[in-house]
Amino acid sequence: MIRTAVATRPVRAGAAVAAVAGIALLAGCSPASTDTGSGNGAGSGSDTGAPAYADGTYTADGTYNTPESVETISVTVTLADDVITEVDVEGDPQKAESEQYQGQFIGGIADVVVGQDIDEISVSRVAGSSLTSGGFNQAIEAIKAEAAA
């Protein structure tokens, strides 16, 4: 039994050393990307530094559920080199509480997304409104699909 323990100890130590070396090697690989493009979205031209999305103004609707209703918002963004330069959100609240939260969201969304790469945004809570973000993110995904260059 001692003989078995001695025989397995070098194997375990060797495996541990190999695992640590592998982790160190992989950790050194991740920041080696020289991507100078903006974003890595579907159809991205990021390897060449080209924008992944065509410049322009795009509009899409997004929906989200509240405890009382299903709400819809309309999102319009202007893109230049994959960066959101303008955003406009219009709500169509079905309930008074939704009107309050959509208003808060609309009042604060520009501060969160204007100047950001469209592939790097995913809002979760804006000005106290969290459910509206689901509809906004849904609309952004539709806009990205439409604008894919």
Image (spheres, rainbow, N blue to C red):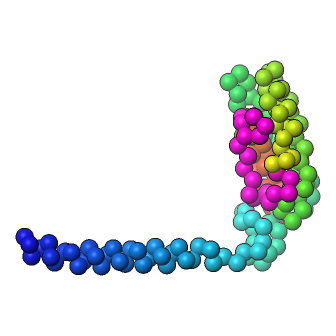
Query: What range is drawn magenta here?
Result: 113-131
Residue drawn at x 78%, y 67% is 38
- Please tell me whether residue 121 belongs to the stretch shown in magenta: yes
Front residue of 136 and 112:
112
The x, y position of residue 143, in whole percent, is 82, 52
Front residue of 22 and 53:
22
The x, y position of residue 114, in whole percent, is 86, 53
- Please tell me whether residue 33 belongs to the stretch shown in magenta: no
Q: Is the magenta stretch mostly helix, strand or loop?
A: loop
Residue drawn at x 70%, y 78% is 34
- Residue 5 is at least partly visible in this image: yes
**On screen, residue 77 above or below 108:** below
Residue drawn at x 82%, y 68% is 51
Front residue of 56 and 96:
96
The x, y position of residue 79, in whole percent, is 88, 58
Q: In which quarter of the image is the C terminus?
A: bottom right
Residue drawn at x 83%, y 62% is 82
Q: Left or right: where does residue 91 sit relative to residue 45? A: right
**On screen, residue 17 above or below 66:** below
Q: Quadrant of the N terminus?
A: bottom left
- Residue 59 is at least partly visible in this image: no
Displayed quadrant of residue 105: top right
**On screen, residue 100 above or below 16:** above
Displayed quadrant of residue 29: bottom right
Q: How many marks?
A: 0
The x, y position of residue 30, in whole percent, is 59, 73
